[in-house]
Image (cartoon, rainbow, N blue to C red):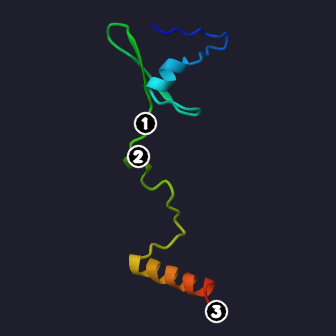
Amino acid sequence: MTAATLTSKGQITVPKEVRQFLSLSAGDRLDFIIDRDGEIRLKPSYVDVSDLKGILKQTHQKTISLEEMEAAIKAGYQRNHAS
């Protein structure tokens, strides 16, 4: 069993063995799940990709088609590679 010590601020350091097992790195978030029998489970907190839909959309931006994107890329390439 792996153990950790609670600080006066309520913080713990997740032991290296647990971090490696869960593939955790600095900045990762963890969920603490309290089961009905009082057991506490710890698991990495993942964001569902569908939750990210629209976070970058800005109301002032125009939606363009793939054809328009390809034309813009081609125009930019030609500008940067004109002899």
Q: At which x and y percent is residue 10?
A: 61, 14
| Other-residue count near label 2 (Cα within 10 Å), few / some / many at <14 / 14–19 / ≥20 | few
Point out the image quarter for the C terminus.
bottom right
Inter-mark Cα distance, 2 to 1: 11 Å
Say which residue appears at 60% left-offset and 9% top-offset: 6
| Other-residue count near label 1 (Cα within 10 Å), few / some / many at <14 / 14–19 / ≥20 | few
Q: Quadrant of residue 76?
A: bottom right
Inter-mark Cα distance, 3 to 2: 46 Å
Residue at disc 3, secondary structure = loop
Q: Amino acid at mark 1?
A: Tyr
Q: Amino acid at mark 2?
A: Asp
| Other-residue count near label 3 (Cα within 10 Å), few / some / many at <14 / 14–19 / ≥20 | few
Q: Which residue is mark 2?
A: 51
Say above or below: 58 vs 76: above
Q: Is residue 33 left or right of residue 6?
A: left
Point out the image quarter for the N terminus.
top left
Q: Which residue is mark 3?
A: 83
* Sequence-first disc among 1 and 3: 1
Q: Name the residue furthest front.
A: 83
Say which residue appears at 56% left-offset and 87% top-offset: 78
Inter-mark Cα distance, 1 to 3: 49 Å
Say above or below: 79 vs 42: below
* Sequence-first disc among 3 and 2: 2
Kindly identify which numbered label has been placed on residue 79: none
Q: Which residue is mark 1?
A: 46
